[in-house]
């Protein structure tokens, strides 16, 4: 759209003025446009990019016939077009939505994208669609200097992604006797939780039951699970280490100082991630610098012995 104008209102004034200051104001030295005036792609008389209330319109209404009146959304699209190369940082709130889109386009490192890492419009070196380092590393990486950070709303516009719906919460009702039993055994903070998430008649949700389980002491956890088996998914025999890697942004499980004190390399044991195998996030890599021997000692004891490779 070559010629456009928009009415300046109280609601949009600050946003339009910001664009005018950045694009025009510093170069022409005139007063900024005011509410009630028109912001324009170009004033047909000068370089001010707005039409004042008091200007004599020596063109009559011809300029309005040649210019298109636009909305604020159109103004934003024109003055701040969505970038071709972009990134957005994965957070706990947006991760599921970002990863759902990435899985539709990525062919590399399908199980590796973590919270804290930037999702990319594309990766110049592979088809992972994410940056493996931190956001600070990306911003200092010359290979990505032309990438622009976008908001979640802009991500949705670019990818046609929609907000992820929250999982359905199942409403249940427990007996008043059981509710009183929980309340009498609870600490003060647990009682506050019960008051907030349980009604007096025992109405609650399966999510609240799981929350109560998380707050409970080790003696009460099995009782709560036994009282409400339908509120808990069937447990897998495998461990899930994804929470660790998402929280710390890495797959190492031993700190560097501990590894150094043992005389081993810093990544001698790592959570297995980035693999197409079903063993991702539930198994460990053992570093190839060492030989690894699994030895049984007695009836129930197993030990893993690293040994140096002969060079």
Image (tube, rainbow, N blue to C red):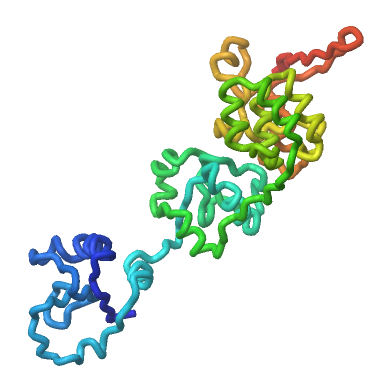
The N terminus, quarter of image? bottom left
Q: Residue at x 72, y 28 (%)?
A: 284
| Residue nearer the viewer, 310 or 296 | 296
Reply above or below: 33 against 110: below
x and y percentages locating residue 105 in the rendered image: 62, 58
Q: Is residue 48 left or right of residue 96?
A: left
| Residue nearer the viewer, 309 or 277 | 277
| Residue nearer the viewer, 267 or 210 | 210
Q: Residue at x 21, y 63 (%)?
A: 17
Reply above or below: 87 against 77: above
Reply above or below: 150 against 295: below
**Quadrant hosting residue 260:** top right
Tally the numbered discs: 0
x and y percentages locating residue 235 in the rendered image: 80, 34
Q: Residue at x 40, y 54 (%)?
A: 148
Q: Is residue 39 left or right of residue 28?
A: right
Q: Is residue 116 left or right of residue 103?
A: left
Q: Residue at x 55, y 42 (%)?
A: 92
x and y percentages locating residue 70 in the rendered image: 33, 77
| Residue nearer the viewer, 119 or 295 | 119
x and y percentages locating residue 112 in the rendered image: 63, 42
């Amino acid at each position: 759209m070559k010629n456009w104008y928009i009415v300046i209102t109280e609601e949009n004034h600050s946003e339009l003025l910001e664009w005018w200051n950045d694009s025009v104001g510093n170069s022409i030295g005139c007063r900024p446009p005011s509410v009630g005036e028109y912001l324009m792609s170009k004033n047909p008389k000068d370089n001010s990019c707005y039409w004042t209330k008091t200007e004599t319109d020596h063109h009559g209404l011809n300029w309005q016939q040649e210019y298109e009146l636009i909305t604020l959304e159109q103004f934003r699209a024109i003055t701040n077009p969505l970038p071709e190369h972009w990134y957005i940082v994965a957070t706990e709130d947006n991760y599921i939505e970002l990863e759902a889109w990435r899985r539709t386009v990525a062919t590399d490192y399908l199980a590796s994208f973590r919270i804290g890492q930037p999702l990319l419009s594309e990766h110049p070196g592979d088809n992972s669609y994410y940056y493996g380092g931190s956001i600070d590393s990306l911003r200092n990486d010359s290979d990505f200097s032309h990438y622009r950070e976008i908001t979640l709303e802009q991500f949705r516009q670019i990818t046609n992604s929609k907000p992820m719906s929250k999982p359905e919460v199942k409403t249940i009702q427990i007996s008043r006797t059981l509710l009183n039993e929980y309340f009498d055994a609870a600490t003060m903070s647990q009682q506050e939780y019960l008051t907030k998430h349980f009604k007096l008649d025992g109405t609650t949700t399966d999510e609240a039951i799981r929350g109560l389980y998380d707050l409970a002491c080790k003696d009460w956890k099995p009782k709560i699970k036994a009282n409400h088996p339908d509120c808990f998914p069937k447990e897998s025999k495998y461990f899930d280490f994804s929470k660790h890697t998402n929280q710390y942004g890495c797959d190492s499980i031993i700190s560097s100082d501990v590894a150094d004190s043992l005389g081993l390399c810093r990544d001698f044991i790592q959570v297995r991630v980035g693999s197409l195998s079903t063993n991702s996030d539930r198994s460990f890599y053992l570093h190839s610098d060492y030989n690894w021997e699994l030895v049984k000692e007695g009836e129930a004891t197993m030990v893993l012995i690293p040994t140096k490779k002969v060079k």
